[in-house]
């Protein structure tokens, strides 16, 4: 029996030298270590041996099994190493070398520009106020002077979340951050209903519109709403605030302009543009015509003030809505707003 075990070991090791691929190696393993292999038959026959032979044969069989298993492990490792070297173009892998360093994470460029805007407006005395993204039609439109059926609703194609059975007040994804104006004013007014305190806040957040996507338009994007309410606030205060914001972000020579526009929740209303300093106002892939529209603005409509709990006879205010991605495009020379949400590391690692 001992001679048989030596023959089994010799045959197995000799056969292993001829193995060249994974399939052949698996066949070798089954032939010499499988349940039906000659070695396993020796283990199965130990009970038929005498008491004197059994421990001797059993010990020798275990040693042969260990030798065969060690040879199998060694050959398997050699074949894996060879396959890895082939995949690396013949380059040998030194597993003792230190691993590649994991690159540190970083803030998304949208987050960076939002934090910069928080800093700028914080220096002007504005507080950050947050409001929900899922709104009712009442807050998103009606309290902002968009009555049911008003044609201005067509300016903002809307994603509805729940409309069935809710009549004129369906649930929707907010189309702008302006509903936060009503939430904020009502919270401030609740502190002292007879003499509500002044409001000076910025409201950041994601908004959603069913729009045609192009280089300067997305279906979801961030806005930064601004609101200031108090006695004696004028349009000059609005212009001064936004012009100062642009100078703080882009430098003292930055030029801005206001173009007359229409928004139901402000009167008068304007579009706010910054001259493209990348092309000197000549027109480029970023601005498209020398100026880049950053957002809309205007004096808070008396109806909106009243819906927020402020007497329009005693209080005035201004509001603005900025596009942080548009500002980032101008600052970093980004030609396509779609880059912000594609999660392409080649783009994100530049910031």
Image (tube, helix red, strand yellow):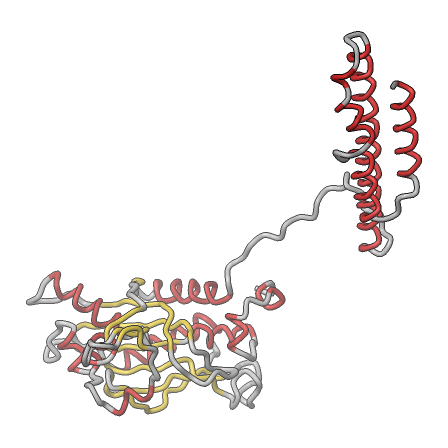
Could you tell me residue 253's position as x and y percent?
Answer: 48, 78
* Left or right of 212 on screen, residue 169: left
Up/down of 75 relative to 170, above or below: above
Give coordinates of residue 156: x percent, y percent: 34, 84
Q: Nearer the viewer, residue 164 or 1?
A: 1
Question: Where 155 falls versus 84 (above or below)?
Answer: below
How many labels, in total?
0
Point out the image quarter for the N terminus: top right
Above or below: residue 156 compared with residue 309: below
Q: Position of residue 276 (x, y in %)?
A: 51, 83
**Quarter residue 346 falls in:** bottom right
In the image, what residue occupies the spot 81% across and 54% down? 88
Residue in view at x 23 percent, y 73 percent: 136
| Side (left or right) of 281 relative to 198 | right
**Residue in the image at 54% along x and 70% along y:** 342
Q: Residue furthest top?
A: 52
- Residue reaching furthest left? 194
Question: The C terminus appears in which quarter of the rendering?
Answer: bottom right
Left or right: 155, with 5 as reference point: left
- Residue found farthest to the front: 48
Q: Is residue 278 above or below residue 332?
A: below
Which of 103 and 137 lies nearest the eye of the viewer? 137
Q: Quadrant of residue 122?
A: bottom left
Q: Position of residue 326 (x, y in %)?
A: 46, 77
């Amino acid at each position: 029996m001992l001679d048989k075990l030596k023959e089994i070991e010799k045959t197995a090791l000799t056969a292993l030298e001829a193995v060249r691929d994974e399939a052949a190696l698996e066949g070798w393993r089954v032939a010499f270590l499988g349940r039906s292999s000659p070695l396993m038959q020796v283990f199965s026959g130990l009970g038929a041996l005498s008491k004197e032979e059994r421990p001797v044969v059993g010990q020798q069989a275990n040693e042969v099994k260990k030798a065969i298993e060690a040879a199998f492990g060694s050959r398997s490792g050699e074949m894996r190493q060879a396959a890895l070297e082939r995949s690396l173009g013949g380059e040998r892998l030194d597993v003792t070398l230190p691993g590649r360093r994991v690159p540190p994470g970083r803030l998304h460029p949208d987050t960076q520009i939002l934090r910069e805007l928080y800093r700028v407006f914080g220096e002007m005395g504005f507080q950050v106020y947050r409001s929900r993204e899922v709104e009712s039609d009442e807050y998103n439109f009606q309290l902002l002077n968009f009555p049911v059926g008003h044609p201005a609703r067509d300016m903002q194609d809307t994603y509805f979340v729940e409309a069935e059975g809710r009549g004129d007040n369906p649930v929707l994804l907010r189309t702008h951050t302006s509903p936060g104006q009503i939430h904020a004013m009502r919270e401030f007014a609740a502190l002292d209903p007879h003499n509500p305190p002044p409001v000076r806040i910025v409201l950041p957040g994601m908004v959603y519109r069913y729009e045609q996507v192009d280089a300067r338009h997305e279906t979801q994007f961030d806005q930064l709403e601004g609101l200031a309410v108090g006695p004696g606030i004028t349009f000059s205060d609005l212009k001064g605030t936004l012009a100062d914001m642009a100078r703080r972000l882009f430098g003292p020579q930055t030029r801005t302009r206001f173009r007359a526009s229409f928004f139901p929740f402000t009167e008068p209303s304007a579009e706010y543009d910054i001259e493209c300093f990348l092309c000197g106002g000549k027109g480029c892939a970023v601005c498209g015509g020398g100026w880049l529209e950053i957002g809309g603005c205007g004096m808070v409509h008396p109806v909106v003030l009243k819906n927020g709990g402020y007497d329009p006879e005693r209080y005035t205010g201004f509001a603005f809505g900025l596009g942080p991605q548009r500002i980032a495009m101008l600052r970093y020379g980004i030609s396509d707003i779609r880059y912000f949400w594609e999660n392409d590391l080649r783009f994100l690692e530049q910031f």
